[in-house]
Image (tube, helix red, strand yellow):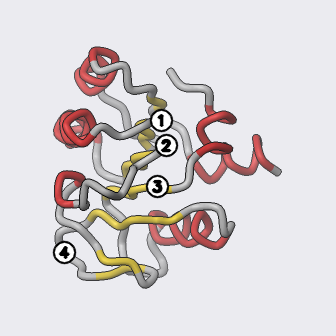
Amino acid sequence: MLDIKEVLENAKTIAIVGLSEKAGRTSNRIGKYLQNTGKYRVIPVNPTVDEVFGERSYKSLLDIPSEIKIDIVNVFRRSEHLEEVAREAVQRGCGAFWAQLGISDETAAKILDGANIPYVMNRCIFVEHQNYLY
């Protein structure tokens, strides 16, 4: 488990896995909110789009250049995809792992525990940002 307030206060770069370019999607609204705080750089991870919010989109966490430090991986994919994303987060050396509301997976949690990557699942980063930082 991670210290939500500490992670949100110290993060600079958030990679959002499943970030949609469609304005009506929850991932888009939350990604835009995070970017608009002026505190975070939002890196889109979505193999079906080239760019979101003026940032290049990457096919996977592993495709993001190594010189970009990822403080939080925020996941907007179904629970059955969490194990794969957790393995990529470990391989990439990400700081923290955040699965959005309604998304969780025990195998992913074990993978993250084994790599000492703090994580939270089934919680909304927008709601928690509002609760802890405003």
Residue under the image location 25 percent in, 66 percent down: 46
- In the rendered structure, which amino acid carries the disc numbered 2? Leu
- 3D distance between C-alphas at marks 1 and 4: 25 Å
Q: Disc 4 designates what residue? A: 48
> In front of the other: label 1 or label 4?
4
Q: Disc 3 designates what residue? A: 14
- 3D distance between C-alphas at marks 3 and 2: 17 Å
- 3D distance between C-alphas at marks 3 and 1: 17 Å
> In front of the other: label 2 or label 4?
4
Where residue 99 sits, quadrant-wise, is top left
Q: Earlier in the sequence, mark 3 or mark 2?
A: 3
Q: Position of residue 111 (x, y in %)?
A: 24, 22
Residue under the image location 24 percent in, 79 percent down: 49
Q: Earlier in the sequence, mark 1 or mark 2?
A: 2
Q: From the viewer's perspective, is 9 left or right of 11? A: right
Q: Is residue 129 above or below residue 47?
A: above
Q: Are marks 3 and 1 in contact (CB under 8 Å)?
A: no
